[in-house]
Amino acid sequence: MSRPVSRWIAGLAVLLGLAAIVTAQLGPNRSRIENDLTRRATAALSAAGQTGTRVSFTGRDGVIVTSEADAGRARSVVEAVTGVRAVTTRVLPAAVPPPVTATGAPRNMVVLAEDVRATVDLMLLREQLSVVPPLRFEFGGAGLTTDSRAALRKAAALLADHPDGRIRIGGHTDARGSKATNLRLSRERAEAVRAALRDLGVAADRMTAVGYGEARPAAPNDTAGHRAANRRVELSVS
């Protein structure tokens, strides 16, 4: 083997090793990074007078939820925070005139403010749950895989951060077996996730468990990988 080729192979091996080290270190630190960026971005928004803006992070990518009038300023503030890679803006619907009572008096503005905060909270929860890894199951059973249990703990933490949010837990199966059996199994999977979340501190009355059987596949049931993708539970804000 010629010397230039040997050097090229050695250099490639070093780069691959460094990439593996970086990946191994970033994985466990992802939650810490997200929490740190959220804390610093929230403080920066508060210092800039953007107290009505909410921000959350997936990795180093931020999502802000705010009014149309504040969107540009809030985005600039969050983008300036050290460590932020990208920022997405979610604009709240335009405010409507407050409803009036039978006597013509406007509705309490404090109640309106609480409604806006609740809307922002649910939008953030929906955004954050959408990036939680899928909850997967082994064929024929309602036991979560090891990776899915870790994802479930992340979902429980998100629900703890948004105590007013309610979720629908939808269970699904692949197409093997009878439709009746799959419907029963999907319900068992949804109930298993509901029970696990309850054990992690989520109140039972915040969750609704539903089974869809094989009726809503995420992928064609033509390969082992696709069938595994269909054996799942999905969490959605209700």
Image: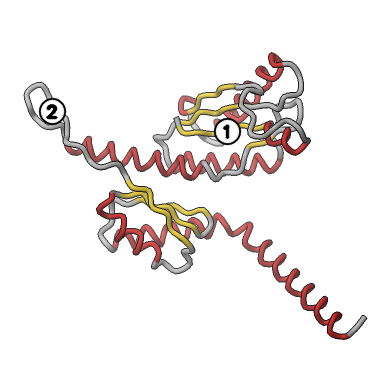
Mark number, residue 160: none
> CA gap, disc 2 to disc 1?
40 Å
Q: Which residue is mark 1?
A: 234
Task: Classify 179 as above or below 166.
Answer: above
Q: Amino acid at mark 1?
A: Glu
From the top left corner, tell me how far across and down residue 86 is, in percent.
Answer: 46, 61
Mark 2 residue element: loop
Indicate the quadrant where residue 14 lies.
bottom right
Question: Where residue 180 appears, x then y in whole percent?
Answer: 69, 14
**What kind of element bears circle 1?**
strand
Asked which colour scheme the image uses, the reply is secondary structure
Quick one: quadrant of the C terminus? top left
Name the residue rendered at 27%, 55% in the picture: 70
Dot 2 or dot 1, earlier in sequence? 2
Locate residue 210 relative to residue 125 in the image: left or right: right
What count of labels does the image hold? 2
Residue 214's place in the image compared with 138, above or below, is above
Q: Residue furthest bottom?
A: 3
- Please report the residue visible at 37 percent of the width from the left and 57 percent of the height from the top: 42
Q: Could you tell me residue 161's position as x and y percent?
A: 44, 43
Q: Amino acid at mark 2?
A: Val
Please identify the quadrant where the N terminus is shown.
Answer: bottom right
As rendered, which of 132 and 144 lies closer to the eye?
132
Provide the residue designation for mark 2. Answer: 100
Density class for disc 1 (Cα within 10 Å; few <14, some 14-19, many ≥20) is some
* Image location (x, y in percent) of residue 120: 35, 43
Q: Left or right: 117 with respect to 122?
A: left
Q: Is residue 76 left or right of residue 159?
A: left
CB-based contact (under 8 Å), mark 2 and mark 1: no
Seen at 73% across and 73% down, the residue is 15
